[in-house]
Image: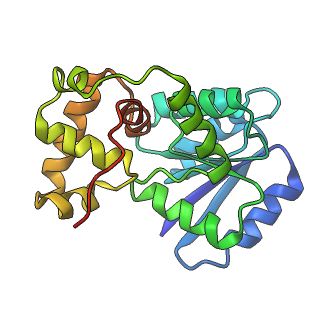
């Protein structure tokens, strides 16, 4: 059972999400908050697995709250669900530690799937938002693979490709015939060597190096 905390400043949105998500047997909405500060206050007692986070809220916005959750409760995933697809919101949320980014017009089935994917270690991103991320990569100066090779081993590069492909540790392990624990150790080493905080940031960096192709089984 995945425990969810909904953070949105609109009562009608919070109630609507409770009703929509409550119909899935694998999800449990354990609470809701009207702003980021309230969400942070509730987390210790509610112990959610994932916070469904809006961005533009009073007192503490979603970007600020995501950063605090990432720092104080690193085991809790944050999935952004917002109406904002402007570049500054997207990049700030991802830099702050968001594990995924969806727009509020996402259908119920897509939202439920994205929640489960996020908890499983994947990084769901709305197609409109993904376009902005790829545009940023294209506009940036591509760096040669050799620059990465200086920091990472060939095996670490393979694992990084898996992260860039949005695969979970279990899926990467299955592809490379490793244990999930071994992949987890590799991921920790990769994050440390690249100087990034989480797998989402590592995946974005991998895209800049042209490492999006994890290959086929």
Q: Nearer the viewer, residue 170 or 37?
A: 170
Relative placement, left or right, of 104 versus 25 is right
Answer above or below: position of 66 versus 174: above
* Residue 46 on image: x %, y %: 56, 51
Q: Residue at x 22, y 45 (%)?
A: 159
Q: Quadrant of the C terminus?
A: bottom left
Relative to residue 143, is residue 22 drawn left or right?
A: right
- 35 w.r.t. 169: above or below: above
The percent coordinates of residue 99 (x first, y second) are: 50, 44
> Image point 45% across, 20% down: which residue?
141
Q: Nearer the viewer, residue 33 or 171?
A: 171
Residue 119 placement (x, y as % from top left): 45, 57
Task: Tell me if residue 96 can be seen.
Answer: no
Question: In the image, residue 106 lies at what x, y percent?
Answer: 71, 61
Q: Is residue 13 left or right of residue 97?
A: right
Residue, x 35% and y 30% (percent of image)? 209
At x 58% / y 45%, what residue is drawn? 130
Quick check: 157 above or below 82? above
């Amino acid at each position: 059972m995945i425990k969810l905390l909904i953070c949105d400043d609109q009562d009608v949105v919070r109630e609507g999400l409770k009703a929509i998500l409550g119909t899935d047997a694998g999800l449990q909405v354990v609470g809701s908050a009207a702003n980021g500060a309230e969400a942070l206050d509730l987390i210790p007692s509610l112990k959610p697995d994932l916070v469904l986070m809006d961005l533009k809220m009073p007192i503490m916005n979603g970007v600020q709250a995501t950063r605090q959750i990432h720092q104080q409760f690193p085991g809790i995933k944050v999935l952004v669900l917002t109406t904002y697809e402007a570049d500054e919101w997207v990049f700030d949320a991802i830099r702050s530690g968001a594990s995924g980014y969806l727009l509020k017009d996402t259908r119920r089935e897509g939202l439920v799937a994205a929640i489960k994917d996020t908890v499983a270690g994947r990084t769901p991103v709305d197609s409109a938002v993904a376009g902005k991320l790829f545009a940023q990569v294209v506009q940036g100066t591509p760096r040669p693979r050799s620059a990465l090779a200086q920091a990472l081993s060939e095996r670490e590069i393979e694992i990084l490709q898996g992260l860039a492909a949005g695969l979970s540790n279990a899926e990467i392990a299955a592809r490379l015939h490793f244990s999930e624990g071994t992949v987890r150790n590799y991921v920790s080493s990769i994050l440390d060597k690249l100087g990034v905080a989480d797998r989402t940031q590592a995946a974005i960096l991998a895209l800049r190096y042209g490492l999006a192709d994890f290959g086929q089984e």
